[in-house]
Image: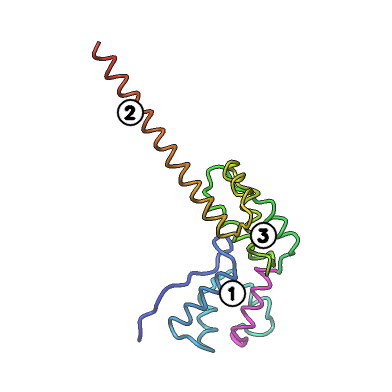
């Protein structure tokens, strides 16, 4: 028997979305060359007791093992991942600003997570750029970005990250200079 590649834990709503769980499970099936009827058995085995009981109730009086993998996935997907309302998702996206202590990259990752349910389609890069610029904490960087004539999302991100890194380096240098200055003063005072 061939070695199993990877591991899929039971589905836990607190750890990931059901869509992400299914994507990981599909990769597990591909990596281990699991197909058709065997895929149903593996799916029913790994999803965990809560999801299995839910499926059992949903397909009753039929047996869960008599359903196709796609049918089972669809049933659970409809249960765990109902279709979100686009306007509500866009509201969350547009309300999200950079939080204190959050790096520009962390902020952008969160924006990208939020945009997945916004259906921006052709407007995505503009929406990301606008949120990035409008909700940056650093107003000096924000003002600089607002002066750019043709500002793409990628360029805005690159400049915001560079500005953030320059600020961090400057603060680090200021702290080191301040410490060095105090040491010199202390040494000078101790001579007298």
Residue at image position (65%, 54%) is 131
Q: Residues within 10 Å of mark 1 (few under 14, many from 20)?
A: some
Q: Nearer the viewer, mark 3 or mark 1?
A: 3
Which quadrant, please, contains the N terminus?
bottom left
Is residue 107 placed above or below 101 in the rendered structure? below
Q: Secondary structure at mark 1?
A: helix
Residue 175 numbered mark, or none: none
Residue at image position (68%, 77%) is 58
Q: Position of residue 20 (x, y in %)?
A: 56, 69
Question: Which stretch is magenta?
Answer: 65-82
Q: Secondary structure at mark 2?
A: helix
Residue at image position (52%, 84%) is 39
Residue 127 numbered mark, or none: 3
In the rendered image, which quarter is residue 16 located in?
A: bottom right
User: Would you say the residues marked 3 and 1 are in contact, meaning their CB atoms lie under 8 Å apart?
Assistant: no
Toward the viewer: 55 or 138?
A: 138
Residue at image position (59%, 83%) is 69
Q: Residues within 10 Å of mark 3 (few under 14, many from 20)?
A: some
Residue on which disc 2 sits: 180
Q: Position of residue 169 (x, y in %)?
A: 42, 42
Residue 75 inside the magenta-drawn segment = yes
Residue 115 inside the magenta-drawn segment = no
Tell which circle, 2 or 3, labels the residue nearer the N-terminal end. 3
User: In the displayed image of the protein, which residue is found farthest to the left?
Assistant: 191
Q: Secondary structure at mark 3?
A: helix
Residue on which disc 1 sits: 52
Q: Position of residue 57 (x, y in %)?
A: 67, 75
Toward the viewer: 117 or 105?
A: 105
Q: How many marks?
A: 3
User: In the displayed image of the protein, which residue is found farthest to the front?
Assistant: 149
Q: Nearer the viewer, mark 1 or mark 2?
A: 2
């Amino acid at each position: 028997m061939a070695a199993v590649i990877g591991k899929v834990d039971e589905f836990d709503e607190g750890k990931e979305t059901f869509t992400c769980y299914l994507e990981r499970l599909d990769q597990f099936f591909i990596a281990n060359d699991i197909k058709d009827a065997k895929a149903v058995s593996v799916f029913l085995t790994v999803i965990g007791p809560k999801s299995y009981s839910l499926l059992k109730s949903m397909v009753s009086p039929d047996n869960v093992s008599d359903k196709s993998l796609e049918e089972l996935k669809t049933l659970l997907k409809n249960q765990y991942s109902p279709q979100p309302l686009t306007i509500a998702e866009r509201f969350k996206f547009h309300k999200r600003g950079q939080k204190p202590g959050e790096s520009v990259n962390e902020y952008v990752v969160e924006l990208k997570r939020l945009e997945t349910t916004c259906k921006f389609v052709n407007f995505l890069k503009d929406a990301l750029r606008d949120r990035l610029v409008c909700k940056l904490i650093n107003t000096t960087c924000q003002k600089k970005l607002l002066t750019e004539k043709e500002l793409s999302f990628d360029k805005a991100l690159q400049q915001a990250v560079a500005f953030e890194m320059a600020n961090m380096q400057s603060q680090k240098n200021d702290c080191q200079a301040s410490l060095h200055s105090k040491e010199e003063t202390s040494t000078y005072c101790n001579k007298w």
